[in-house]
Image: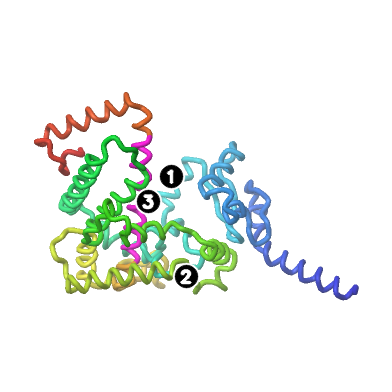
Amino acid sequence: MAAVWLVVLAVVAALYALGSRRHGYWRVRRVLHDTPLPFLGNNAPVYLFRRTVTQLADDLYHKYSSAKVIGFYRASRPELIIKDPAIIKRVLTTDFACFHPRGLNPNKQVIEPLLRNLFFADGNLWRLLRQRMTPAFTSGKLRAMFPLVVARAERLQTRLAHSLGHPQDARDLMARYTIDFIGACGFGLDVDALNDDDSAFRKLGDNIFKIGPREAVLIVLKEVFPETFKNFKYLPKLEAEIREMLHTILKQRNYEPVGRHDFIDLLLECKKKGIMTGESMERVRSDGTADVVAVEFDEDLMVAQVFAFFVGGFDTSSTVTSYALHQLAYHPDEQARVQQEIDQALAKHNNQLCYDAQT
């Protein structure tokens, strides 16, 4: 019996040592931090859905009010929360070359296809994507895309005109409207989620932000054991749906821009420019000059950018606009002032909603 207990204690001690192997990082450097838990670090409240990432950072910010920096452990990975504006400025300017990785991917070598987008990408891929795609969002191209937004705004206006006197769910309404203009501006599709309760595009938007038990567990496992679970995907079904949809649209356009000025056209224009090349942010030649790297702007990268476009536009826009409508409904004086400013802006442009009317 004693031997069994010794084995159990040995296993527990080994697991504790394994789960805490990097938890002395900030203590050695004398950086203030909360005591981490084995394997989970300081991120347990997020893993257990008790706090969001933002709330946890805010808690630490106020707890260590006099500190310039705060140590943090995301599972076993040490991270630094910077509070001092002078240090933040250095990180984002003069020392940016040392701090460019965003650290959003648990494994640096194996990155899920959907996450190879401008938001999640690190290092060379981030720089090449940024160099290739930033010129695609010129004011002229955004202006060309604006009529697609106006058409959906007019459809929203018509729906509301037919619903006067009836309560409206602002969150649902703005989600439907956002889906409509993302479908038009991003994919060249007339989704009509405003009037179609069974819109597949609307369901796609809902599914992106639904985290089930599988996704919740996988998020924790990939951060706690990044090497073991590096080949497991967060969103395999969603990836297949977006890939199939993109492939269908590209086939319809014969893999060429068609002059719609939507996001797919912009991606096709980026693809036509060929392989992305540039100086490496990670490798240096023996003579001290930066190595040259090259990445093909293929369909996989297009799928990732479409995913980022959808996610970045859907929840952000629908949440902000629905909250704004909610606040205006409870503050009629401010609502009247906003209405007056809108009327004045439209009066300058023949009472037509246009790109210039927003400035």
In three-dimensional space, the C-alpha distance between marks 1 and 2, rounded to whole angstroms, equals 35 Å
Q: SS for tag 2?
A: loop
User: Does residue 106 appear left or right of residue 15 in this picture?
Assistant: left
Determine which residue is flagged by label 1: 89
Q: Locate the N terminus and report the quarter of the image it occupies.
A: bottom right
Residue toward you, 46 or 155: 155
Mark 2, other Cα within 10 Å: few <14 / some 14–19 / many ≥20: some
Mark 3, other Cα within 10 Å: few <14 / some 14–19 / many ≥20: some
What's the amino acid at mark 1? Lys
Q: Nearer the viewer, mark 2 or mark 3?
A: 3
What's the amino acid at mark 2? Lys
Q: Is residue 212 above or below residue 332?
A: below
Q: Nearer the viewer, mark 3 or mark 1?
A: 3
Identify the mark nearer the N-term, 2 or 3: 2
Q: Is residue 269 magenta?
A: no
Query: Do residues under tags 2 and 3 come within 8 Å of each other at their CB atoms?
Result: no
Q: Is residue 324 magenta?
A: yes
Q: Which mark is residue 233?
A: 2
Range covered by the magenta-colored residues: 304-326
| Residue 220 in the image, given as x and y percentages of width and height | 57, 62
What's the amino acid at mark 3? Asp
Determine which residue is flagged by label 3: 315
| Residue 315 in the image, given as x and y percentages of width and height | 37, 51
Q: Locate the C terminus and report the quarter of the image it occupies.
A: top left
